[in-house]
Image: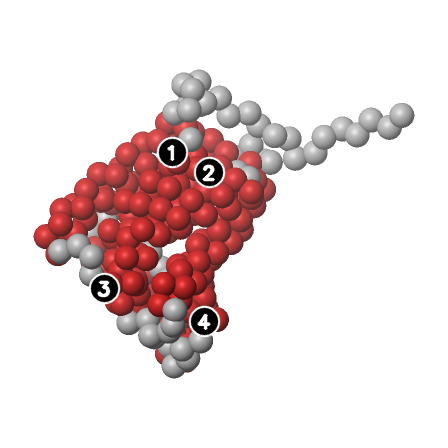
Amino acid sequence: MELLTGFLVGLLGSFHCIGMCGPIAVALPKSNPLVLSRLLYNLGRVITYSLLGLVFGLLGSRLEMFGLQRIISITLGVLILLTVITPTSYRLKISNALGLYKFVGILKMYFGKVFKSHSKSSMLVIGLLNGLLPCGFVYIGITGSIALGDPVNGMLFMMMFGLGTLPMMFGVSLIGSVINMNLRQKFTRLLPAFSLILAAVFILRGLNLGIPYLSPKLEHKPATEQVICH
């Protein structure tokens, strides 16, 4: 269920990705064979997302050991809600305060260096860097990894997220804009609603209502277990 959710988040979020990552995908250096170079670029993105899932899944597991899993799930759901309802101007101010613009500037500097190369390895590196770009839907994927409370599941969740973005981003990197602006705007209007649904799922999960799949009973894993020596 969690892996399918990760894939759907990536698939629906890929329409949003076109706006930020699309220009990078379209401007990729021409490298032969073209299909292989674009696959390497997208593989790089998936690898970065998977590593992020591993790290934040590990963080979630550490928090879970202290019985915070329910609180984490509800908190993440509330944060997603706040992200949706917060005006864009305030979100920009928060991003600036967190130093995200400075981080993007550093990434652009590395992009400039790697884009000068036309090697296959450079395509992979561009994808790896691309995966680090600040993105609202990546943040939602990361919250899912934290809520899962397991590094392996967190990694798999984000891997499926990356694979969900693959069809759209591979198409864009291969042949440019594959959908017209009107269709893209229609999908973009659905993204806040999808975010609200995800927020509700996280909150319900944290409420521990005993509903299978939607709000299962979350058992606390003690930080230490008694070791019995024979």
Occupied quadrant, residue 201: top left
Say what secondary structure mark 1 lies in: helix
Q: Residue at x 76, y 28 (%)?
A: 226
Q: Position of residue 55 (x, y in %)?
A: 53, 51
User: Whole-Å distance between the Cαs marked 4 and 1?
Assistant: 40 Å
Residue 188 as seen in the image, left or right of residue 128: left
Residue 44 lies, with reference to residue 120, above or below; the image says above
- Residue under label 3: 176
- Residue under label 1: 202
Q: Earlier in the sequence, mark 3 or mark 2?
A: 2
Residue 196 as seen in the image, left or right of residue 104: left
Residue 25 as seen in the image, left or right of residue 159: left
Name the amino acid type tagged 1: Phe
Q: Residue at x 48, y 56 (%)?
A: 47
- Residue 198 seen in the figure: yes
Image quarter in which the C terminus is found: top right
Occupied quadrant, residue 30: bottom left
Disc 1 to disc 2: CB gap under 8 Å: yes
User: Whole-Å distance between the Cαs marked 1 and 2?
Assistant: 8 Å
Image quarter in which the N terminus is found: top left
| Of 188 and 217, the residue lying toward us | 188
- Residue under label 4: 120
Q: Position of residue 88 (x, y in %)?
A: 21, 55
Name the amino acid type tagged 4: Lys
